Amino acid sequence: MRAKNRTLIRGVLVAAALLGFAGATPALAEGSWTSHISNWGPGSESRRWADGDRDDAVTSVTFKGCNTDTNEFKNADLELYKDVFGPDKTYGYRLNRCDTSTWGDQSSGDYYFTLEGVRGGGKLWVDTVTTRY
């Protein structure tokens, strides 16, 4: 009887330790989405996403596989906005050279980015766009 109790107690302690360890692992980014861009000109808007600000993840947009209508892509000017009552709040421009643009950890709300300009052509195509928040 005593051996059974020790085995049971040992099992409970091991399970508690494992649950404690699992709870101590670092949190991942709250959310992300992946898409592509076809035939975008200045003023084009991305899809919108809701950031609940449940973590410390920065908001970032990554472009892979960039091209323009003239096949001379140099960079794209992106601007992050928060959808608010009245004029949407801007978080500034970032120059994207077919890489990652970041805007820091944002407060909760609905966000989107726009293409403000493209150098090396008039229209933009991007094979993979990944937004993390």
Image (cartoon, helix red, strand yellow):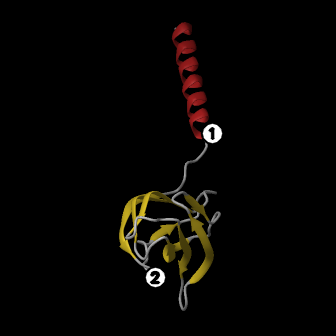
Badge 2 density bin: few <14, some 14–19, many ≥20, Cα 10 Å: few
Closer to the N terminus: mark 2 or mark 1? 1
Marker disc for residue 43: 2
Q: Is residue 111 something one can see in this rendering?
A: no
Determine contact: label 2, label 1, CB under 8 Å: no
The x and y percentages for residue 43 are 46, 82
Q: Is residue 6 above or below residue 43?
A: above
The x and y percentages for residue 101 are 58, 62
- Kindly identify the amino acid type of the residue bearing the numbered disc 2: Gly
The x and y percentages for residue 29 are 54, 53
Q: Residue at x 55, y 90 (%)?
A: 87
Secondary structure beneath label 1: loop
Secondary structure beneath label 2: loop
Q: Is residue 102 above or below residue 82?
A: above
- Kindly identify the amino acid type of the residue bearing the numbered disc 1: Ala
In this figure, what is the number of numbered marks?
Answer: 2
The x and y percentages for residue 24 are 63, 39
Quadrant containing the C terminus is bottom right
Give the spatial CA distance, label 2 vs label 1. Answer: 43 Å
Q: Is residue 124 something one can see in this rendering?
A: yes
Badge 1 density bin: few <14, some 14–19, many ≥20, Cα 10 Å: few
Q: Looking at the image, which is closer to me, 48 or 22?
A: 48
Furthest residue toward bottom: 86
Q: Looking at the image, which is closer to me, 123 or 90?
A: 123
Q: Is residue 66 above or below residue 42?
A: above
Q: Residue at x 56, y 75 (%)?
A: 79
Question: Quadrant of residue 33 in the image?
Answer: bottom left
Which residue carries the number 1 mark? 24
Please state if 105 lies on the left or on the right of 19 as rendered: right
